[in-house]
Image (cartoon, rainbow, N blue to C red):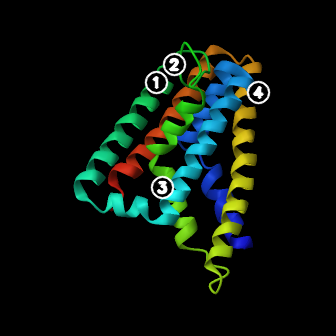
């Protein structure tokens, strides 16, 4: 169980579309709007979890046409987000928007986030610790995963809000935007070249 918890921590804390966009929403719109977006990400990630656990995600992605369309939409959307982050200007807002994305935006992001599917597949298909009680193991994994997920995502939201408050020089803010965009593009590249 400890190995599973460590895997959850390291897989979730690494920059991906969810945490990067959450930090950006926090930087641009503050805690309250960031909290709504975080709730959407939470709902979305649990929908992905249920899709992975039930086998629905695997069944859908086993159909070649569906898989190609899903990966194409995911890669295009994540590349678009990376572009928006990189060219947000000299203010850290990671993603420039007139209004915050809200709950629906968080759910949508997780629905097309290949990292969410990869992480959940790795966590729920591996790290068995109760092989004779799979239902109990799945329930415990969901509890552990969500507890760590919530803590890490609040940390990223706080980081976005804190960076904004630091009022860093414009050049530094621009560099942070480019670093965040590069991280997002690494996820896009991994998704694009991952074996299917």
Viewer-proximal residue among 149 and 165: 149
The answer to whether residue 141 is above or below residue 149 is below
Q: Secondary structure at mark 4?
A: helix
Q: Residue at x 56, y 35 (%)?
A: 106
Q: CA distance from mark 4 to mark 1?
A: 21 Å
Q: Are marks 1 and 2 in contact (CB under 8 Å)?
A: yes
Return the residue at label 2.
Answer: 88
Q: Residue 155: give its label.
A: none
Q: Residue sitting at 60 percent across and 44 percent down?
A: 43
Going from the N terminus, do you reach mark 3 or mark 1 first? Answer: 1
Q: Is residue 50 above or below residue 92?
A: below
Query: Which residue has dot 1 on it?
Result: 84
Query: Where's the N terminus, which quadrant?
Result: bottom right
C-alpha distance separating marks 1 and 2: 6 Å
Q: Position of residue 175 (x, y in %)?
A: 57, 26
Q: Which residue is mark 3?
A: 117
- Alpha carbon distance from label 3 to label 1: 23 Å
Residue 164 location, quadrant: top right
């Amino acid at each position: 169980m400890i190995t599973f918890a460590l895997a959850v921590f390291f897989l979730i804390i690494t920059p991906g579309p969810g945490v990067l966009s959450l930090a950006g929403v926090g930087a641009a719109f503050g805690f309250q709007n960031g909290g709504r977006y975080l709730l959407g990400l939470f709902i979305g990630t649990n929908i992905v979890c249920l899709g992975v656990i039930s086998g629905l995600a695997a069944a859908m992605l086993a159909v070649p046409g569906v898989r190609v369309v899903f990966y194409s939409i995911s890669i295009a959307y994540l590349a678009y987000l990376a572009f928006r982050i990189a060219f947000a200007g000299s203010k850290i807002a990671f993603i420039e928007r007139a209004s915050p994305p809200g709950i629906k935006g968080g759910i949508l992001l997780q629905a097309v986030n290949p990292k969410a599917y990869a992480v959940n597949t790795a966590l729920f298909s591996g790290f068995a610790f109760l092989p004779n009680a799979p239902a109990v193991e799945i329930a415990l994994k969901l509890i552990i995963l969500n507890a760590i997920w919530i803590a890490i995502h609040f940390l990223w939201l706080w980081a976005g809000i804190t960076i904004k408050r630091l009022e860093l020089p414009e050049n530094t803010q621009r560099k942070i935007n480019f670093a965040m965009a590069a991280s997002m593009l690494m996820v896009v590249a991994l998704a694009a070249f991952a074996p299917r």
